[in-house]
Image (cartoon, rainbow, N blue to C red):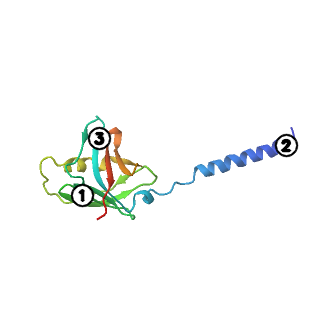
Amino acid sequence: MNASQPLLRLWYTLFLVLSCAACATPAPPATQALGGTAWQFVRFQGGDGRVQVPDDRAKYTVAFTADGGVNVRFDCNRGRGSWKSDWPGQLLFGPLAATRALCPPGSLHDQFVKHWFYIRSYVLRDGHLHLSLLADGGIYEFEPLPKR
């Protein structure tokens, strides 16, 4: 056995341990990316390619608070709930307490309510927020809510 082999093994083991420790470093919480932001709906593209756009973008809004709260407007109804993201790209919404007014024909309210709990991930791209449904069910695209 060469005298330098034990030293090489020690360096190799140390390298592997440090490499694994770097892999286990947690990513920064996604609350830094979404907390304190507000968005209005631009369009929905379904997994089947169907595209829907709102008659008025400001009727469909989502506002994320830094402490895990979310405020929504789905056409003629408003709601409040919670959200969490344990790693960047993941998004889970909690129960939503919302008003139950009957919205006019053509409203996307029912679709938003139906899809809300199936949103599982997000991407921030070109200044827009994209919320994705489970199993390639579709993507909701939002733009920043204009400052008033």
Residue 55 position within the rendered picture, expressed as x and y whole percent measured from the top left = 19, 49
Q: Which residue is mark 3?
A: 45
Q: Quadrant of the C terminus?
A: bottom left
Residue 66 position within the rendered picture, expressed as x and y whole percent measured from the top left = 39, 64
Front-most of residues 67 and 61: 61
Considering only order in the chain, which callout, 3 or 1, is on the residue closer to the N terminus? 3
Q: Nearer the viewer, mark 1 or mark 2?
A: 1
Using the image, tell me which numbered label, if any, was put on residue 73. 1
Q: Which residue is mark 2?
A: 4
Q: Amino acid at mark 3?
A: Gln
Q: Secondary structure at mark 1?
A: strand
As measured in the structure, the alpha-carbon distance from the residue carrying label 2 to the one carrying label 3 is: 62 Å
As measured in the structure, the alpha-carbon distance from the residue carrying label 1 to the one carrying label 2 is: 68 Å
Within the image, what quadrant is residue 69 found in? bottom left
Q: Secondary structure at mark 2?
A: loop
* Point 52% across, 54% down: residue: 27
Can you name the residue that lies furthest to the top here?
Answer: 48
Q: Amino acid at mark 2?
A: Ser
25 horizontally vs 4: left or right: left
Within 10 angstroms of label 3, few (less than 14), some, or many (20 or more) residues?
Answer: some
Q: Secondary structure at mark 3?
A: strand
* Point 31% across, 63% down: residue: 147
Q: Nearer the viewer, mark 2 or mark 3?
A: 3
Front-most of residues 7 and 125: 125
Q: Quadrant of the N terminus?
A: top right
Q: Amino acid at mark 1?
A: Arg
